[in-house]
Amino acid sequence: MSASTQTNGSASAPTNRAPLVAACLLGALLLGAMLAPALAPFAVDALDLANRRASPSSRHWFGTDELGRDVMTRVLFGARVSLAIGLVSALVSAAIGAAVGATAGYAGRVVDDILMRITDAMLAIPRLPLLMITAAVLQPSVPVLVLLVGLAGWMETARVVRAEVLSLAARDFVAAARAMGASPFRVVLRHVLPGVIPAAAVATTLAVGRGILLESALSFFGVGVQPPTASWGNMLYQAQTTMTSEPWLAIFPGAMIFLTVLACNAVGDAIGAARG
Amino acid sequence: MIRFVVRRLVQSVPLLLVISLLIFALIHAAPGGPLSTYLENPNVRPEDIERLRKAMGLDRPLGMQYLSWLWAFVRGDWGFSYADGRPVLDRLVERIPATLELIGVACVMALIAALPAGILAAVNRRFDRVSSIFAVAGISLPVFWFGLLLQLVFAGALGWLPSSGRASFDGGDFVDRVAHLILPATVLAAALSAAWSRYLRRAMRDTVARPFIRAARSRGLSERTLLLHHALPNALPTFVTVVLLDISMMASGAVVTESIFAWPGIGSLFTEALGKRDYAVLMAFLMCGSVAVMVLNLVADLAVHTLDPRTRDAA
């Protein structure tokens, strides 16, 4: 699948404000997550035992859970975990993907063959089941979980970066740099990689959304972020059993996952379309 | 053609070896290994565990275990489920029809939605705006949340459809089976149709911008003929490739959907096995999933081969 074959111009109308809205939404989410302790109406583990399983009201906007904890507070604090996992895992993916892609694209021959075979193999193994097994086996803490999600998502970036490096490496300015005696390492780092950044940025933005989805899916199956730490996925996991009687426990965390991933994808698409 | 298939099959052998090595290493990195379920059971004595370990060959060096597992796997001996002692192959095979039924229906639903949507979005600005929103939303929708919502509304509040399973207890007639299929198939189809309409829109757009379309238009062909008889056949190879690759990726999408709706397919077998740390089943699932991806990759190449006459000489 050759990326960036989209026709230039007229692809996205100049009046299209959706990406801007999405970017603002992401900014607001990030801000909300960072300021969670100040914004949240209640303390994160405050129990209101008189108001357990309360439906949404003016006091508890998103209702309360089985321990009387305020769902809105937990959603806000869950945003910290979910967003952090999405962002950091995407950076991990980007770093590994760029390293593998650049090495394969620039070194070529046997190295390229081996690295791309490994990439193919990783792409062929069903991603979510593989992650679920790994998480069940390792019972990871949040930092390890970030690493795992990142390790599961570098293949797309690696392919994109490799393709870009292949086309850039054939250009005259790279030949010039090499002729001036620059080492392969320096050529890649200073001359080739900067040109790869736009393509890698698209892949990374999309990886943020995918990372959040993967984390929430893992937590939804009980092998991701463990309670009492709130993440959107494990809130959904806990909500599942009492969903018919207390639907608000499932609706709000899921809506947050949806909105966040939607915003990431909209921004990623917009960057991709702008590159043409 | 046959040489092409054979060459691809030979090429896939080292790939499968790498995958099997990865999967094997992962599962044996587990603390307690396949016997971890017994470690916490107070009724199982340590000497029993030791005996089991010997009997199952888990005390041999890892390399030996891998080789004997691989050799058995190639011969179709996939071992026994640690959970209920039945052959892994039997457990997988009995679940296949349900999964195929679900994926098949979902794919048909997704194609019915995606084909017209993708074509129309490529040529009509206003429709493109609306369908883009739906498409990005569909791609971003967390499968498990969407499934829960549908259950909440259509099975809970409205009570129109059954919330889980493949049929009612008495086996169910045709109508009953269709009723059970609707919700899980919709969940799977939503994400697929969103992605597919985007692919098709893009492929159609790229094609419509090419000179031969302009030439055909200047010859006075109707827009309809132009789109369906000139542009679509050219856009189809790329589209078919991504569709087939997506279907192979459904191994994971189906895991979530099947377990939410208690659909008795391979996906829910996987989640059951995961809960019981049934490594023999998990390993077989991952291997089958990877093989499915590679086979569909090959099918995709062959499909492009037949759909696009230009590639025939190249291969």
Image (tube, grey):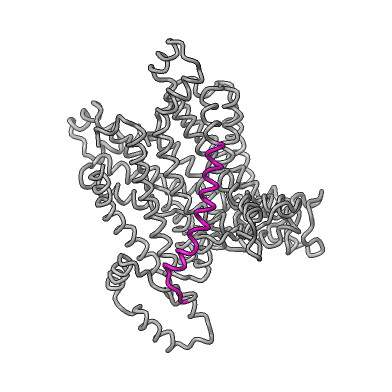
Position of B46 relative to A60 (above/below): below
Confirm whether the magenta stretch covers residue B110: yes
Locate the C terminus of chain B and report the quarter of the image it occupies. top left
What segment carries the magenta color? B85-113
Residue in front for this viewpoint, B227 or A249:
B227
Position of B160 relative to A132 (above/below): above
Q: Position of residue A229 (x, y in %)?
A: 61, 60
Q: Residue at x 40, y 39 (%)?
A: B241
Residue in front for this viewpoint, A264 or A133:
A133
Residue B116 falls in image quadrant? top right
Q: Residue at x 52, y 60 (%)?
A: B265
Q: Is residue B107 left or right of residue B79?
A: right
Q: Residue at x 43, y 40 (%)?
A: B242
Position of B100 relative to A268 (above/below): below
Residue in front for this viewpoint, B293 or A100:
B293
Q: Position of residue A204 (x, y in %)?
A: 45, 41
